[in-house]
Image: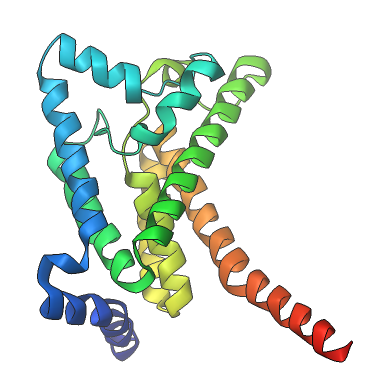
C-alpha cells in the first residue's frame, strides 16, 4: 500500500513539478489569473457596503432567487470566496488544484471543466431546493437564501477527473472520502454540492476519456470500411 500510494503521488505531481521547474509561474498563467480574480472579489467584498453589494449582485448566487437572476451570476460565482471559507483558503485551493490540472490538461480544458461543473452543481442545488419546497426533502429551507459561491466544487471535480485520467486511485479515494466525510459531518448545501462535484468528475472522465475516443475510433473504422 505504501508503494502504491507513493507511486500515485509521484505520477500525479511529476508533470507539474517538471513544468514549474522549467517555466516557473509561466506554466500556470490561467491559474494565477483565477487566483487574482478571487483576490479582487475578496477586496471588493471588504469595501462595505458598496463593494459587497456589487459582488453579491454579480456573483452572489442564492438558490432561492429567480432563475433569470441566478444565471448571469454563475460565471463569477466560481471565483467569489465562499462565506464559510477564508479567501486565502479559496485562493490556495485554486492555486494547487487548478495549477496541477493546468500543467496536465492545459488552461482551456481546465476552465471549461471548472465553469461547467460550477454551473451544473448550482443547478443541482436548485433541484434540491425544489425538492425541499415541494416534497419536504433535500436541502434545509435556510440554505435557499445563503450565498452559494466559491471554487470548491470545481476543485473537487478537477481532482477526481484528473486522478481517474492518470489512474492515481489514491488521489480519487482521498478526495472522495474527505468530501463524503464532510457531507456526513456537515450536512449542508456545500457538502451536498461536493458530492455532486465528485459525480461530475467521474462523468467527465467517462465522457472525455472513454466515450469520446471510442466514438472517434468507431467513426474512423466506419469511414475506412466504406
Q: Is residue 15 left or right of residue 218?
A: left
Q: Position of residue 98 (x, y in %)?
A: 29, 58
Specify whether residue 110 is in view: yes
Tag count = 0
Image quarter of the C terminus? bottom right
Q: Nearer the viewer, residue 215 or 123?
A: 215
Q: Residue at x 40, y 35 (%)?
A: 75
Drawn side of residue 3 relative to residue 216, left or right: left
- Percent of width and height locating residue 212: 65, 70
Residue name at image x 41 percent, y 15 percent: 145
Query: Measured from the top left, where is residue 91 in percent x and y?
Result: 18, 46
Q: Nearer the viewer, residue 163 or 136?
A: 163
Between 36 and 159, the one nearer to me in the picture: 36
User: Would residue 188 be seen by someone viewing this image from the given angle?
Assistant: no
Task: Tell me: residue 140, above or below residue 7.
Answer: above
Residue at position x 34%, y 33% in the image: 76
Question: Quarter of the image containing the N terminus?
Answer: bottom left
Question: Could you tell me residue 52's position as x and y percent?
Answer: 20, 16
Placement of 76 over or under 113, stated as above or below: above
Q: Residue visible at 43% across and 76% down?
A: 169
Amino acid at each position: 500500500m505504501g508503494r502504491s500510494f507513493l507511486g500515485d503521488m509521484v505520477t500525479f505531481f511529476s508533470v507539474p513539478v517538471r513544468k514549474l521547474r522549467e517555466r516557473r509561474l509561466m506554466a500556470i498563467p490561467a491559474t494565477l489569473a483565477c487566483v487574482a480574480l478571487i483576490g479582487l472579489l475578496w477586496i471588493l467584498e471588504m469595501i462595505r457596503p458598496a463593494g459587497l453589494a456589487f459582488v453579491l449582485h454579480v456573483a452572489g448566487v442564492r438558490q432561492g432567487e429567480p432563475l433569470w437572476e441566478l444565471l448571469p451570476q454563475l460565471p463569477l460565482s466560481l471565483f467569489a470566496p465562499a462565506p464559510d471559507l477564508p479567501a486565502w483558503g479559496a485562493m490556495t485551493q485554486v492555486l494547487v488544484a487548478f495549477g496541477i490540472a493546468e500543467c496536465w490538461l492545459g488552461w482551456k480544458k481546465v476552465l471549461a471543466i471548472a465553469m461547467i461543473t460550477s454551473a451544473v452543481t448550482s443547478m443541482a442545488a436548485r433541484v434540491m431546493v425544489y425538492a425541499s419546497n415541494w416534497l419536504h426533502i433535500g436541502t434545509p429551507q435556510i440554505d435557499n437564501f445563503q450565498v452559494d459561491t466559491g471554487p470548491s466544487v470545481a476543485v473537487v471535480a478537477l481532482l477526481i477527473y484528473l486522478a481517474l485520467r492518470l489512474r492515481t486511485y489514491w488521489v480519487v479515494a482521498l478526495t472522495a472520502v474527505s468530501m463524503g466525510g464532510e457531507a456526513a459531518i456537515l450536512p449542508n448545501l456545500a457538502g451536498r454540492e461536493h458530492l455532486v462535484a465528485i459525480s461530475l468528475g467521474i462523468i467527465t472522465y467517462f465522457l472525455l476519456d472513454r466515450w469520446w475516443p471510442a466514438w472517434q475510433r468507431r467513426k474512423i473504422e466506419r469511414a475506412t470500411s466504406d
